Image: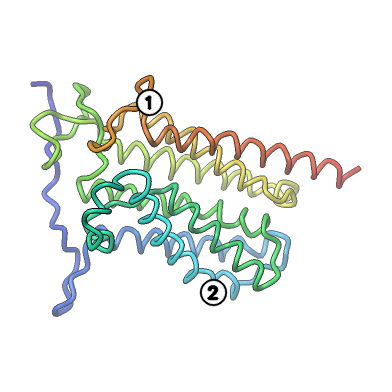
């Protein structure tokens, strides 16, 4: 067998406070959510639209509900509908894993639309702020997937292959780490650098488009190394469900970028 890295012995319980046990899985999601929230608060004064710190604070609750409900609903519908339809109680056992980014994304979109309508905020500018902070949550979310030994990659002989506890005896791509780097770190850096340019901050929807398209590209690439869900397997042409859901994101994201740049140019003329 090729050289492989054994999976680190991680106690799933990060902290115990009497009868309350906080798992690393939940803690990573909390850190990602709070980190994204604080970063959005920091950059919000630089964007147009009069979006205040209070608006960002208030939206945190909405975003949490959107991520949890949307993410879980997306996983149930897209990835394991037969199982959950037969075991509806398992839908609520989110600590066992099973969240869909695409579903969570749609949940946050709906939450943002309702929030902006209630507070009369510019939807596209608000979306740009969320887009800049979301990669932080994605980074820690993928680290949570790794700690939970889920969503691992396909078998491999690369030197950094990892033997996961529930992934069989063969080393596998640590695809969760690939996603943390591509969807989290790299996408954050791209948005961070571009958001420092004032004229781009005044092109509503631009960062939304870059984020959506960037995520779609990153996810489509990582899916080449990620083990597809056992209950779904490969789809037509060796593609995966993740790729089928990500390709439309690339097209939609590019449309948002095009529209933002065209509108910006028309505004300047």
> Looking at the image, which residue is at 56% across and 66% down?
41
Q: Earlier in the sequence, mark 2 or mark 1?
A: 2
Instruction: Name above or below for residue 218 compared with residue 155.
Output: below
Q: Residues within 10 Å of mark 1 (few under 14, many from 20)?
A: some
Q: Do the residues labelled 2 and 1 touch (CB within 8 Å)?
A: no
Instruction: Please give the name of the residue rendered at 42% of the width and 62% of the height, measured from the top-left corner.
Output: 33
Q: Distance between the residues labelled 2 and 1?
A: 40 Å
Question: Of residues 150 and 23, which is closer to you in this image?
Answer: 150
**Which quadrant would the N terminus be assigned to in this image?**
top left
Q: Judge left or right: residue 214 versus residue 50.
A: left
Q: Quadrant of residue 13?
A: bottom left
Q: At which x and y percent is residue 130?
A: 56, 56
The reply, left or right, for residue 255 in relation to residue 192 is: right
Q: In this view, does 195 lie to the left or right of 5?
A: right
Q: Which of 204 and 5 is in front in this view?
A: 204
Q: Name the residue under label 2.
A: 58
**Residue 266 location (% of width, % of height):** 86, 42
**Circle 2 or circle 1, nearest the eye:** 1
> Where's residue 249, x and y in %?
54, 39
Q: Which of the 4 image quarters holds residue 176?
A: top left
Residue at the extreme bottom: 18
């Amino acid at each position: 067998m090729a050289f492989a890295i054994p999976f680190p012995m991680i106690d799933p319980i990060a902290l115990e406070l009497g009868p309350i046990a906080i798992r690393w899985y939940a803690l990573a999601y909390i850190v990602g959510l709070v980190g994204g929230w604080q970063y959005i608060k920091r950059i919000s004064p630089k964007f147009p639209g009069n979006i205040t710190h209070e608006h960002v604070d208030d939206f945190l609750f909405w975003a949490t509900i959107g991520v949890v409900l949307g993410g879980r609903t997306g996983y149930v519908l897209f990835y394991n509908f037969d199982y959950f339809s037969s075991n509806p109680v398992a839908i609520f056992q989110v600590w066992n894993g099973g969240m869909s980014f695409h579903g969570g994304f749609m949940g946050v979109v709906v939450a943002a639309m309702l929030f902006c309508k209630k507070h009369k905020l510019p939807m596209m500018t608000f979306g740009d702020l969320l887009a800049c902070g979301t990669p932080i949550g994605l980074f820690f979310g993928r680290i949570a997937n790794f700690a939970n030994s889920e969503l691992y990659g396909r078998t491999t002989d690369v030197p950094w292959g990892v033997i996961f506890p529930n992934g069989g005896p063969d080393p596998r791509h640590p695809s969760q780490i690939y996603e943390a780097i591509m969807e989290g770190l790299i996408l954050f850096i791209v948005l961070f650098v571009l958001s420092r340019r004032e004229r781009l901050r005044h092109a509503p929807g631009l960062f939304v488009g870059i984020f959506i398209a960037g995520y779609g590209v990153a996810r489509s690439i990582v899916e080449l190394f990620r083990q597809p869900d056992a209950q779904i397997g490969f789809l037509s042409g060796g593609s995966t469900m993740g790729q089928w859901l990500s390709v439309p994101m690339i097209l939609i994201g590019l449309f948002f970028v095009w529209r933002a740049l065209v509108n910006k140019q028309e505004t300047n003329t």
